[in-house]
Image (cartoon, grey):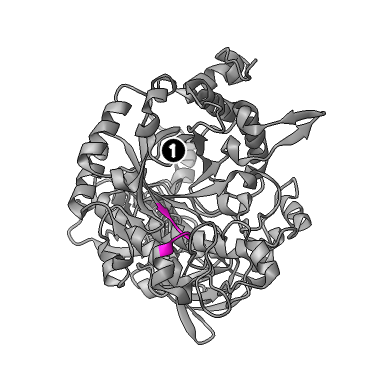
């Protein structure tokens, strides 16, 4: 068929000249190049990600560390699409495929990395192979007054670092998972020491501030002042202190602790076997074992022997016997608490009167039928804490309980007479000395993998600082467990609505009134401890503390929302009152308390407990 002239013209219009063809090819190649580049940018990380399932597939992985930028403590880990999949603290070890970065569409560069069992990407600015580059801060200020340590992993006491003091950083021990430093090695003036990161702040203003809450708890502390000579409540530290958690080491504190008490001279296999018989089939899940009692020791401590102090004590058992007895408790599945008296210790005072409370002539001063090492003296602190750490390591204790963490009864009378030298060389208040001792003790014992408890007089449920230095919020803020001793026979007779109240005859009321006060005290600090309470089991002035009166005290605690458990106290040990205990030990009070809450009842009502005598 012949082609028309019109068709010929149309074809001619669709033909390109050689110049047009060249231009078209150039444009096409440019477009292809741009598309390829964009495609590579968007998929280069995915392509790099796909071949390797773990770092073992890399021929020569690079070891590095997560580096946080100034003002931050963590860095972000991303998947191949640059979606965040985790935050990791500075100092975290990381593996890179290589030091060859990958570029993203946004122009940022990332390393292909293996971290915490997964593949991903991390920004190049957050990686370093230089550990010295991890610590960006150069100086700090003390936020909580503490005694520093001479070494990071020892109990040797260093200089006192006062609130607001400037510290120059010279090193650190290690980074925690959240990117914070565990302990800083610092220079304070011309002195060196180690201090935990929770006791410092980055700027002076933060360091000089005080912990407070919506209820103005700090204002309440300031208002209370120092009415009885124990110290000013406003001069104590209420910033949160880190509590122990050693569950990953197999040391888990019971949610509710029900404990029997063993004296120092009973810590032997034959007597412990009797305790195991008493506890079998009951709700008991813990034992408090005394290792040091004033002048008595359960075993010949190698540490005290090394310190040339052992001969002053009466030793009731051998090291092997004590170890076997405690192991029997642990093998049976019980949580074991090692108890020691702290500042009531006639043996230590006799051996070191220069560390102890004396008259102004240097003669030991007997108070409450005992001699007392001074709670102000750091040498005393070190002896007690080193002994406690030795016991944790030797016997595998779950917890250390410091008893007699106080000055002697009626100490203010001796001070008013001017008849005592308390060895207070640092011009501290009694309350400051006790809180600072427990801060030091808790830090050291935590490093050995155990919890710390402290015993408190029942009087400290009140709002004031006691004359002997105990102040509930200040001590609860530091330790893991606070152990009140609200024995009804320790409270004086008083009148209420014209009724004469004799506390030892009203065990439920006495304990419940105390518990309500303590519930208030627990809210007045940044990190309150678990409340686990000592219970009176001995008869008093002809009034029998039978199983009913023991149960009344325990239930009274739960009715005041004090739910950390109980410890049964008798100076001669729990075997001495064993005939009273079977009925008490059958109750799981925490479970009953939860049921009573669900029923919107007090535990006493839920159990239909008769709380008062006729």
Please report the residue visible at 67 percent of the width from the left and 55 percent of the height from the top. Answer: 465
Nearest the camera: 399 or 300?
Answer: 300
Q: Quadrant of residue 262?
A: top left
Circle 1 packing at 10 Å, graded few (<14), some (14-19), many (20+), is: some
Is residue 273 visible in the rendered image? The answer is: yes
- What is the quadrant of the C terminus in the image? top right
Percent x, y for residue 421?
58, 74
Q: Quadrant of residue 324?
A: top left
Please report the residue visible at 38 percent of the width from the left and 73 percent of the height from the top. Answer: 151
In the displayed structure image, the side of residue 273 where residue 407 appears, left or right: right
Please report the residue visible at 53 percent of the width from the left and 21 percent of the height from the top. Answer: 594
The residue tagged 1 is 570
Percent x, y for residue 52?
23, 48
- What is the quadrant of the N terminus in the image? top left
Vertical arrangement, residue 154 with respect to residue 272, above or below:
below
Is residue 18 visible in the rendered image? The answer is: no
């Amino acid at each position: 068929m012949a082609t028309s002239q019109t068709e010929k013209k149309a074809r001619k219009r669709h033909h390109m000249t050689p110049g047009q063809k060249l231009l078209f090819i150039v444009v096409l190649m440019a477009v292809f190049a741009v598309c390829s580049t964009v495609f590579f940018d968007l998929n280069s990380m995915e392509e790099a990600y796909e071949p390797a399932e773990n770092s073992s597939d890399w021929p020569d992985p690079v070891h590095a560390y997560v580096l946080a930028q100034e003002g931050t403590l963590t860095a972000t880990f991303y998947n191949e699409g640059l979606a965040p999949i985790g935050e990791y603290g500075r100092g975290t070890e990381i593996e890179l495929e290589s030091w060859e970065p990958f570029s993203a569409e946004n122009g940022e560069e990332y390393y292909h990395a293996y971290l915490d069992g997964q593949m991903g990407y991390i920004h190049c600015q957050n990686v370093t192979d230089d550990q010295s580059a991890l610590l960006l801060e150069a100086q700090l200020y003390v936020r909580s007054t503490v005694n520093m340590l001479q070494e990071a992993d020892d109990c040797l006491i260093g200089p006192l670092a006062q609130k607001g003091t400037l510290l120059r950083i010279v090193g650190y021990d290690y980074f925690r998972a959240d990117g914070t430093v565990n302990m800083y090695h610092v220079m304070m003036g011309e002195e060196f020491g180690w201090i935990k990161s929770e006791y410092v702040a980055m700027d002076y203003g933060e360091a000089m501030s005080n912990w407070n809450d919506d209820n103005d708890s700090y204002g309440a502390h300031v208002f209370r002042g120092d009415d009885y000579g124990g110290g000013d409540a406003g001069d104590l530290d209420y910033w949160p202190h880190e509590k122990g958690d050693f569950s990953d080491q197999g040391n888990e504190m019971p949610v509710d602790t029900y404990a029997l008490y063993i004296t120092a001279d009973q810590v032997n296999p034959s007597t412990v076997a009797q305790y195991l018989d008493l506890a079998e089939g009951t709700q008991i899940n813990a034992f408090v074992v005394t290792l040091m009692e004033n002048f008595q020791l359960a075993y010949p401590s190698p540490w005290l022997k090394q310190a040339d102090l052992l001969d002053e004590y009466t030793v009731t058992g051998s090291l092997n016997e004590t170890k076997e007895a405690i192991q029997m408790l642990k093998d049976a599945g019980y949580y074991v608490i090692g108890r020691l008296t702290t500042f009531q210790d006639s043996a230590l005072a006799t051996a070191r009167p220069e560390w102890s409370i004396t008259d102004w002539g240097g003669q030991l001063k007997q108070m409450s039928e005992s001699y007392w090492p001074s709670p102000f003296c750091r040498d005393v602190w070190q002896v007690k804490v080193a002994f406690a750490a030795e016991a944790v390591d030797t016997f595998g204790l779950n917890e250390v309980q410091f008893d007699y963490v106080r000055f002697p009864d009626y100490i203010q009378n001796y001070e008013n007479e001017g008849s005592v030298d308390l060895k207070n060389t640092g011009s501290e208040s009694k309350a400051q000395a006790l809180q600072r001792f427990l801060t030091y003790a808790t830090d050291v014992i935590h490093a050995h993998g155990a919890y710390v408890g402290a015993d408190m007089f029942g009087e400290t449920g009140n709002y004031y600082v006691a004359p002997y230095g105990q102040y509930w919020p200040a001590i609860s803020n530091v330790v893991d467990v606070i152990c009140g001793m609200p024995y009804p026979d320790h409270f004086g007779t008083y009148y209420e609505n014209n009724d004469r109240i004799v506390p030892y005859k009203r065990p439920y009321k006495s304990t419940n009134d105390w518990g309500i006060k303590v519930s208030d005290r627990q809210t007045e600090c940044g990190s309150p401890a678990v409340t686990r309470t000592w219970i009176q089991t001995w008869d008093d002035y002809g009034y029998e503390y039978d199983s009913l009166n023991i149960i009344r005290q325990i239930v009274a605690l739960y009715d005041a929302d004090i739910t950390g458990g109980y410890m049964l106290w008798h100076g001669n040990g729990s075997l001495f009152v064993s005939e009273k205990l079977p009925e008490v030990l059958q109750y799981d009070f925490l479970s009953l308390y939860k049921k009573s809450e669900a029923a919107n009842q007090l535990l006493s009502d839920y159990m239909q407990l008769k709380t008062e005598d006729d």
